[in-house]
Every structure is written in structure tokens, then in C-alpha cells.
Image (cartoon, rainbow, N blue to C red):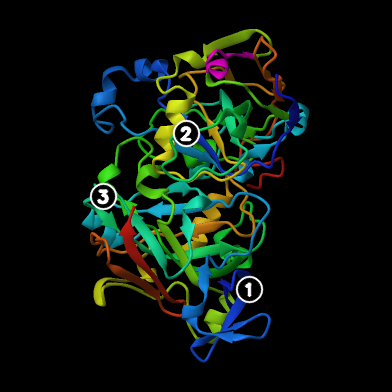
Amino acid sequence: MKQARVLYQDQLFQATEEADALRLDNDELVSFEQVQWLPPLAPISRPRTILCLGLNYRDHAAELAFKPPSEPLAFLKGQSSLIGHDAHTLRPAEATHMHYECELAVVIGRKAKDVQAADAHTVIGGYTIANDYAIRDYLENWYRPNLKVKGRPTCTPIGPWLVSAQALKKQKRDPANLVLETKVNGVVTQRGNTQDMIFSVPYLIEYFSSFMTLQPGDLILTGTPDGVVDCKVGDVVECSIEGLGILKNTIATL
Amino acid sequence: MPASSPSPSIATVYGVLMNHPSEHEALGTSINEAPYKAVPNAPVLYIKPSNTFVSQKKAEKGITIPLSTANAQSISVKGDEDGLDMRPCVGLVFQTPYAQGSTRFKTQDFEVGFFLDITRPHNSFYRPPIKFNAMDQSLVLPAMTIGFDSWDELAKLEVHCSVNLLNQSTYNVQDFLRPPLALLKAVSEFIAFEAGDVLLLGCPAKGLRVKQAGDTVVVMTFDSLITTLVAKFLNVPPVGAANEEGKV
């Protein structure tokens, strides 16, 4: 399964990719530009839990001059920060360090509590791309990183597709070995591989589910490799992950 | 007095640290030393995710968070000390969305209730405390929330908390460094609020601690503005400890 959720002529549709176009679930075929892309996540009747990892790639930790952590460094953000593919991400006028962060996002597919790493695959619903923007100007040392840095509306683009584990397997791709890449205005500025995660996806699921029950629709944003760069107004940022497509957004003024 | 109504569907719950003078006093000079290096500028927020939600009804029957992590095998569940800290909070429930950058908040767009925020004791506030405060059942929701007429009315609230009706603590909303309206504005600078979202107004440092199974917590205010909240704690074996058969 590889699905998007879009607004077309003010109506909500699920859609699949067909010959560089979108097949809506009313059978209409439309172009990517004709729709508004939403986060590719089915609605749920509870607030979505969004777990984010800081410092989960070996090179990124070195880049920010930190020793790799011995325990996952995680924070939560609210669902009001999510926005779909091909939208605008708002930069405050005073910001000087607004960093994209291309991340593999795991979508939980089944209730998960006390799941062992070896069984983690049984609770994963699918994968998508997230851009966990950080406005580092606002960093403080209390419950760091704080939500002024990380929880801002429009600042967590996610999508374009929700791709199931089976769909990745069909492409002969392994979630633990996917190239991630970010381009700003067409120039590659970040490149890494999910194999460089300090804490793997199965370990993270075991860790989090040991003290909290995760539910379908919950997200784990698994961190970003090194190569973060300040994004200015007008910049077009494209985060791509093998097998998951390209998540694009444009920086605009807050 | 506005009519009462049942609890709305609670969405994202934001709590705030360092909004009471006692939290600053408890840290003393360490506020300006590493790792903190300075008093916080922006409101220090944390989120209580939906797995933490437990209804008043269920909480009265018994909360199943392990009280001791002494024998825990898993790194993720060790607290700095045994027991659970009680943070009785006044929570503002948004009845309507408020966009980022809002400065005008109307009292009729909110209801208010007690939320009991339960935290495993921890001594550092440098990194987010997820494993200490995002446990299942670590946020008792109010049975009901009610409207209020003015921000001044809210400021007059006195919150009483007791464990087993013996140990008692009291605080006044008036003492918060950012009063409710100022807190809303400060947080709105960087957060878009959705209907059902909750902003917990803050809590003093070093509240009451629950240590034993059977301990019962009551949170109330004496002017009948908000209904009481009761939670009881059950005996639960430490997570990861061997059970009777010797298996983990």
C-alpha cells in the first residue's frame, strides 16, 4: 500500500500514484499540482502521539558536538504542528538558524505495549517522510528541545505517501537501509542512511512501549543525519527517502 | 454562574514547568549553572500524550502505575526515587481552536477543571521527562469541566491536594509567575491550539508523594468552582521484576 490523502475541489480523498498522477478513490485521475496534500494519516479519535528523536544518528551527534546518548533522547510534539507535502513552512522574521531535519517516520499500526524488538514489525503500520524543523534560535536548557523550537504550526511537514512495510519489501527495500537526502533549491545539503541510526526502529518501539501504550496512528520521527543548513524565506526544501518519495515544502514568512 | 457540562473530548494536553516561584527556589543557584545556565525565557512545556489519560471513574477504582522501580530490569522505567509525585493542576480546556499568535482569549471559549498530573520523581529538568511522565494512566482527567466568567475569577482559585486526607498541600493560582492569560499569550506565540486542547496552568515544586498501595489523593477547591478529583493507587509489581515463576 502506498497512499496519499488529498483535498481536491474542497473534498477529501485517499489516492494512489498512477503514472506520475493521482488516482483518487472516486476513480478520477488528477495531477499532483491540482490537489492540496494532507498528512497521509487516517484520522483517529484521540490526539496523535508524536514521539521525536534528537541525536539518533552518529554523524549528527558529532555535528552538534554531543556525545551519542546512552538512552534514546526523545521529546513529544503536538499534532497541530503537522502539515502536508508541498505546503509552506513559516519562518519567524527574527530566526537565524531554521534547520530542516529529514527523518524516517514510523506510523504505528496496532496497539503496542511491552513489544520486544524482534516483534516490532508486527505493530508497524507503515512509513513516511517527516521534516522535523528546528528553529535553534529558541533553544533553552529546560526540557530541551522545547516546543518553541520544535512544536510550531506548519513546521512538521509529513508525507507525501504512507507506504506499508509490504510495499517497501516489494521494492526490495529495507527500512533499516534507506538513503535519506535533502536538497535546498536543488542542491544536495544532507545525505545519510537509516542504517546509521544509533537506536534502531525495533529498539525504539521496544523502549517506548515498555512504559507507554502506543496506538494506531501514533508516530515516531526517528531523527536526522548530519548536514543541517539554515533555510531562508523562498527556499524550496526537498526531503527524500528511498522508496518513500520526496517531501517538499517552501519557506515563507511568519 | 455558567452551567456545567460533561468533559469535552480532550485533545493535546500541554503542561508547564517553572511557572511557580517554589520551583525556582527549589533549584536555587543551580538555575544559573550547567546544564540550565539561565532562568527560562519561553514557557517550559511538556505534553501528556493520550495514553496517559485515565478517567476520574477509573482513577477512583485504582491507578496501576508501579510505585517502585527498584527492581526494574528495563532502563526505561527507573525513576530517581520510589513513589509517584502528584501535580494537581488547573487545566484550561479549549472549546474552540486558537491560531498561533493569538492575543485575545475570551473566557467563553474555555472551560476549566482539575487534572492530576502524575510523575515519577526526577531531579533534572534538562531533557524532556517522557519516561517519567508519559506512563499510562499518569493524567487523571476531570469528570466535568465548567465555564467561568472572568480571568480574575480563575486567578482567585486555591487548589488543595491531600494524600489519605492527612498530608496536605495548598497553592494559589494567583502565585503563578505567568497568570493564565499571560501564559496563554506566551504559549500561543509558538503553538496552534485545537479544540479540546488543554493548557495546564502550572504547579508548585515538590508536591505530595504517593508511596503505598491504597494511597488516595483528593484534589479540591473550597469555593465549589471546580468539582473534586479523587485518585487511588493500587499495588502493582515493579515493571520488569521477576514474577513468582522467576520469569521477567
Relative to A201, say whether B99 is above or below.
Answer: above
Relative to A55, say whether B150 is above or below.
Answer: above
Disc 2 + disc 1, Cβ < 8 Å: no
Mark 3 burial class by Cα count in 10 Å: few <14, some 14-19, many 20+: few
Residue B1 drawn at (x, y percent):
70, 18
User: Residue at label 1?
Assistant: A13
Residue B150 position by quadrant = top right
User: Residue at label 3?
Assistant: A93
Mark 2 burial class by Cα count in 10 Å: few <14, some 14-19, many 20+: few
**Secondary structure of the residue carrying numbered label 3:** loop
Residue A191 falls left or right of residue B67 = left
The chain letter for the residue carrying disc 1 is: A
Which numbered tag is attached to residue A109? none
What amino acid does circle 3 point to?
Ala
Q: Is residue B66 visible?
A: no
Q: Which region shows up in magenta?
A: B152-162
Residue at the (49%, 26%) spot, across then down: B81
What amino acid does circle 1 point to?
Phe
User: Residue at label 2?
Assistant: B104
